[in-house]
Image (cartoon, helix red, strand yellow):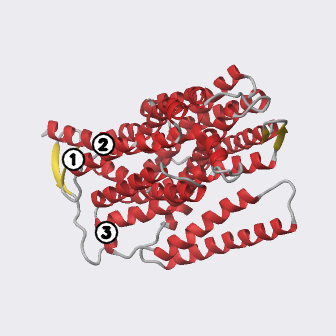
Amino acid sequence: MRAVFENKSLMTLIILSSIGLVVMYIETMVSPALPDFIKEFKISYNVAPWILTSYLVVAVVMTPVMGRLSDIYGRKKVLLIGLFIYAIGTFGAGFATNIYFMLIARAAEGVGIGIFPVAVSIVRNQSSEKRLAFNQGIITSMFATGAVIGLAAGGPIIHYFGWRATFFTIMPLVITLIILVIRFIHDNDKVYRKDNKHTYKISLPKLTKGSFAQSKIDINGAIVFSIGIISILLIITNIQDNMSFINWIILSVLSITSIASFSVFVHIEKKSNSPLIDLKLIINKILISSNVLRMIAGLIMFTILNTMPILIRNPKPVGFSENAFNTAMIIVPFMIAYLIIGVSSGIILSRLGNIRVIILGSILCVVGFTIMMSLFQNFEILLIGLSILGIGSQLLHQGAININLVSTPKNQTGISFGVSNVFYLMGSAIGPTIVGMFMQANKILIPGLGSYPSSNSYILIFETGLILSAFSIILSLLILNKFRGPNVISQF
């Protein structure tokens, strides 16, 4: 019986954690091609980040929606639908001939990414309490694994075959993953659990009419929430150095729209029998703190993935004039450090505790961004700074995730992780948008070559990261001081 349990749970863990690998594989493969998109699609630096941001915005909204759909129709079914949509979007992106086609394809990928919390909830159902932290570390480390593999493969593929090949090469992996889910993942079926002494078989609860799981999906909430998120990103995108009267009108309309959207969203969620996002899980002081820290971690990671390709590939004196192949190799240390910490996060968290891990990670991020802000034009120093940021951002991320898991009631783990993932995706979407804003607002003309982001744009980007990292230290200390009760500290 023990062997059956271990084999089934291990197979489930491997297959579902591979979703994170596939997602990050394609994202980091595409990252070195950002300068190519700017040239081929003839777009500005503040529009280019939407190639990364568009799928993240859709993922922000679809994450709770997919979670709700999985409650109604079953996790496996929703998982497969999401993977099919992701495959269609990825395949379509390879044929994009303009920015609009690309954004639509990327939005389809965003629908697929919304399935990740569904995958986590399946793993959670089949994990013992002792193995939860280990399984969490495996799942999240697969993101870093996919990123490292994607960068290592993406640079050469772009250099020799062009950016379109990056989308096509992922298709065999996506198709294989779909087949494995169909064959080996079971939902609403008998699964195995074990405690310290026994291995036993249980049945997952069936969905019944009139149950919470069978309640309606909050479509109105999803629409209003997406309008609010997109409005915020458009505000950041449209901020410029020399603001005209029209620019101010646009920003004012967007600001009013975002405030009104979130106000209406809160009103809808309070009255809904099946809210898109459980507001109780947002206003909880420990959970909101951990979710904000996850948002900062997502912002840091995608800021690096959006900034580095442009800095490295742009011509001297504002860049390093490297090709896509070398660009990927330069970013790899960041992702390798991210991967190593992710794999060993279970041991680190058990020895240091969540709060200390977050503080350590935040301090390393401050150090990394300080180095980058001051000496990013030095190639060797750049590699050191990226490695430190890889370690720091992953420590910050892992600590925040585990605080969320240990602070959430067991019967709300899936919902709470879904809300937490929304925050992470929001940070991931905001990061590239901020990068584009600074790059578009601070450009320099290089005779005979064109206009490129100036050194000042990179300083502002790294300075923003430094400020947010310092804020995460303060937030962590406030958590530690405010929640010093024995029950909470024992979890931390």
On the question of residue 169 being in view, the answer is: yes
Give 350 or 210, whichever is nearer the viewer: 210
Compared with 272, 477 (above or below) is: above
- Disc 3 residue type (three-letter): Ile
User: Where does residue 434 sit, x and y in percent of width and height?
Assistant: 70, 50
Left or right, residue 409 beside residue 368: left
Q: Is residue 252 left or right of residue 215?
A: right
Q: In the shown orientation, is residue 243 left or right of residue 395?
A: right
Q: Secondary structure at mark 3?
A: helix
At 51% across and 73% down in the image, what residue appears? 221
Decide: few, some or many residues near mark 1? Use Cα within 10 Å; few <14, some 14-19, many ≥20.
Answer: few
Chain-order first, disc 1 or disc 2:
2
Q: Position of residue 170 (x, y in %)?
A: 40, 42
Question: On the image, numbered disc 1 is attached to which residue?
Answer: 184
Query: Which quadrant of the view contains residue 214?
Result: bottom left
Q: CA distance from mark 2 to mark 3?
A: 23 Å
Which residue bears the numbered disc 2? 15
Q: Are marks 1 and 2 in contact (CB under 8 Å)?
A: yes
Q: Looking at numbered disc 2 in the image, what kind of residue is underneath it? A: Ile
What's under tag 1, amino acid-wise?
Phe
Q: CA distance from mark 1 to mark 2?
A: 8 Å
Kindly identify the residue that appears in the image at 41 percent across and 39 percent down.
Answer: 169
Q: Which mark is residue 51?
A: none
Q: Position of residue 77 (x, y in %)?
A: 28, 60
Residue 72: numbered disc: 3
Q: Is residue 469 above or below residue 244?
A: above
Q: Quadrant of the N terminus?
A: top left
